[in-house]
Amino acid sequence: MESRYNPASLEQKWQQSWAQQGLYKTPTDKDKPKFYALSMFPYPSGSLHMGHVRNYTITDVIARLKRMQGYRVLHPMGWDAFGLPAENAAIDRGVPPAEWTYQNIAQMREQLQKLGFSIDWEKEVTTCSPEYYRWTQWIFLQFFKCGLAYQKEAAVNWDPIDQTVLANEQVDNEGRSWRSGAIVEQKLLRQWFLKITDYANELLNDLEHLNGWPERVKLMQANWIGQSIGAQLEFPIIGLDEKIAVFTTRPDTVYGVSYVVLAPEHPLVSQVTTPEQKATVEAFIQEVKNQSNTDRTSEDKPKRGVPTGGKVINPFNEEEIPIWIADYVLYEYGTGAVMGVPAHDTRDFQFATQYDLPIKQVIVPDDADNDNEENDRVKMAYTGTGILVESCNFSGENSEHAKQAIINYAEDEGYGKGIIQYRLRDWLISRQRYWGAPIPIIHCPKCGAVAVPDHDLPVKLPENVKFSGRGPSPLAQLEDWVNVPCPKCGTAAKRETDTMDTFIDSSWYFLRYPDAKNDQQVFDSAITNDWMSVDQYVGGIEHAILHLLYSRFFTKVLRDRGLLHCKEPFEKLLTQGMVQGITYKNRNTGKYFPPSQVSPSNPQDPETGEKLEVFYEKMSKSKYNGVDPLEVMGKYGADTARMFILFKAPPEKDLEWDDADVEGQFRFLNRVWRIVTEFAEVSTSKPKNRELSKVEKDLKRAIHTAIKEVSEDLDGDYQFNTAVSELMKLSNALSEADCKASGIYAEGIETLLKLLAPFAPHIAEELWQMIGKTGSIHTQTWPEYDPEALVVDEITLVIQINGKTRGTLQVPATADHQTLEEYARNSEVSQRHIGDKTIKKVIVVPGKLVNFVVV
């Protein structure tokens, strides 16, 4: 028998044993209820960090628990393997992206396996594998065939030196290209979009059914979708047959419009610009090209614009008003035009004041002092509700009521209509990069955009590619790959050279896991529908909007295509907090220092001697505050790393790494090891037809209290930290119990190991075998508590004299009010402290105390 806890050897031993047994292979029979436990899959960077460890440990505990509770469990893992870093590695290291990616995957898989996760590796998917992206392309074509995938011109980040499109991640905070340093321009290119806006209403409304999601995440999605109820109003352009459509949530202010603003990219700009303003307008448009959308819409930057010379008619009052273009209006949002009402919109007021445009107040507060109306109009915008003034037939009406009345009037007169609009834009999925799934479209001069036939999928990425980071997409330079006959008519045609946004890959991967090796179809609907929806999804809050929203969109589209039955992909969502490390920073220089260069008792800049700022921050290499999981596992073992990560903080909160607390969990596991190994050498017998002793009753109560508390902590909100505390209490109760030969003690040992198993699977398995059990502990049934075992036979009764505690007394828990008083009166404590004094009043608090008021 191993006398000493040696995690390195026993963890390796059990990981090999579990793999040989196929212990975590996904069941194919349906005789048990299903549970789909899923972590957000990682990008294969090559090395695990503590954020990964926390995410996957949480999911693993849930998966292990559910197996013991009688569920058939699907717990898979895969790799979000396409993306920019691999292409950058190809440029910097001169290695193909695939080679770099698969090398990283192998390395990270090995690291994950060392943590003892109960993952079914037969379900592994890799998004950059042709076996996977074949079906990513097939799904794209489902969107294309039902009109949800289309091309249009859209603005992209353009590097004028390298002559290439840049992802947002390749543009720094100053708007410069990551490689050339050039100021990035906005350029219009034909791009592929998915029509997520068709599902905006359903995506918004179905949030209320996601009861297992954090309210914070649902609110973030609702704000991102951004439903606005208002009106689309049309302003005829003087001298043209065209109209400018604007969307507004404040149709009640339409009589105060003093100008209309177009986005510089709006196609009507060239038509409304007069010859006199042409040079000014063109120069301004060129300036705006160099601004990011963030800069253009920033609240703390001045709004800039120029007049076009054109005018429109406000149909509601027949006034002629000027047309401007301005940087703060974006063509992608709304109609690409806004009506300027400076008296009732803060941004419009700033713009009108800056360019001396008219400001006309048409709403006054209910309690307005009309004598000050002129001053109010000039000083600031009034954005509240009130009474309409100078608004023709609507003057005198309440502004809230007037909104619908003005919409009705607009519809009757043909000036516009009431509509619901969303902040959500259609999803631009085109990427002018190599390392992504090729978009399976062929452009034919006769047939237009033609889908690649299903039997020709996947459209494989060619391997004879040169990477420079300059010029157009690497795929566009491969003539042999680009030039193909049209599948419809045979005419010489060209492949689409854009690849897909990597968010496409992660928007459906959870649907592939249940049927991961299917080479005939995207998935067998019967199999995937059996497992969907995901019962518990675990991942970072940073994915609250895009990934989770896109996954919901894909699920709904595939449901409408008849492939899925579920409306939502994820029943419950747990967004775990970050892992933070102790950080040392010189506030003056902004420089970070590794802990090895700093004395914790006197943290000073080793170069200047200045005092360093000490705080916890998200672990990162650049801040020298990371902790290598492999080092922790090498020193303490995977079980200790898992226990610490679960114990230190509730899963949704940030976790502050502390070596002392890691040490504490290692000591706890050593204590468990000692308790169980000592027990294994003692023969026990179950009590037969005899009353349990008080020590046994107390221990049994501690055992079943632990079962109850741990089970409740792992039900619903998953409070792993308090569950671990309960395990510690039970181990303490076992250590202190003076009945080690009793069957109750044996029950306690078995229960401790079963409760510990999901948290520290290796040591639990080893000790389970050590006490003579057969079969894996991870196939045992999760214990259930006995309510009768929690019943207390005796209670400690506090005896007070005139409100002051004088002693305690053990009494039967079932004693009634009168009996408690008798016990207290007859006690040695009462007789000693009351003596000949007169008892004026007796206060009995059942189950707690008896207080004698004496004189």
Image: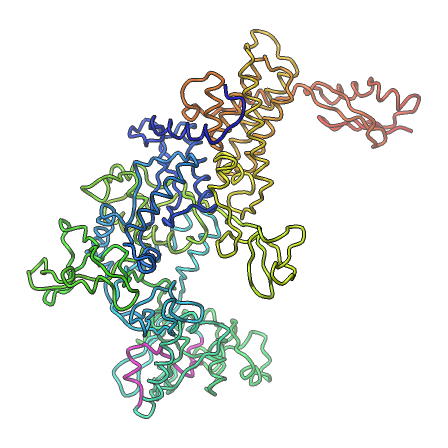
Q: Is residue 545 visible?
A: yes
Magenta-colored stretch includes residue 334: no
Q: Determine whether, in the image, residue 654 is placed left or right of residue 518.
A: right
Is residue 104 placed above or below 380 in the rendered structure?
above
Nearest the viewer among 441 and 645 is: 645
Image point (53%, 52%), residue name: 625
Residue 823 rendering spot, x and y as whole percentages: 78, 18
Identify the image's colour scheme: rainbow, by chain, secondary structure or one colour.
Answer: rainbow
Start-end of magenta stretch: 253-274
Q: Is residue 211 visible?
A: no
Magenta-colored stretch includes residue 255: yes
Residue 464 rendering spot, x and y as whole percentages: 20, 57
In the rendered view of the protein, which quadrant contains the C terminus? top right
Nearest the viewer among 428 and 788 is: 428
Nearest the viewer among 178 and 761 is: 178
Residue 473 rendering spot, x and y as whole percentages: 25, 64
Toward the right, the furthest residue is: 836
Toward the top, the furthest residue is: 689
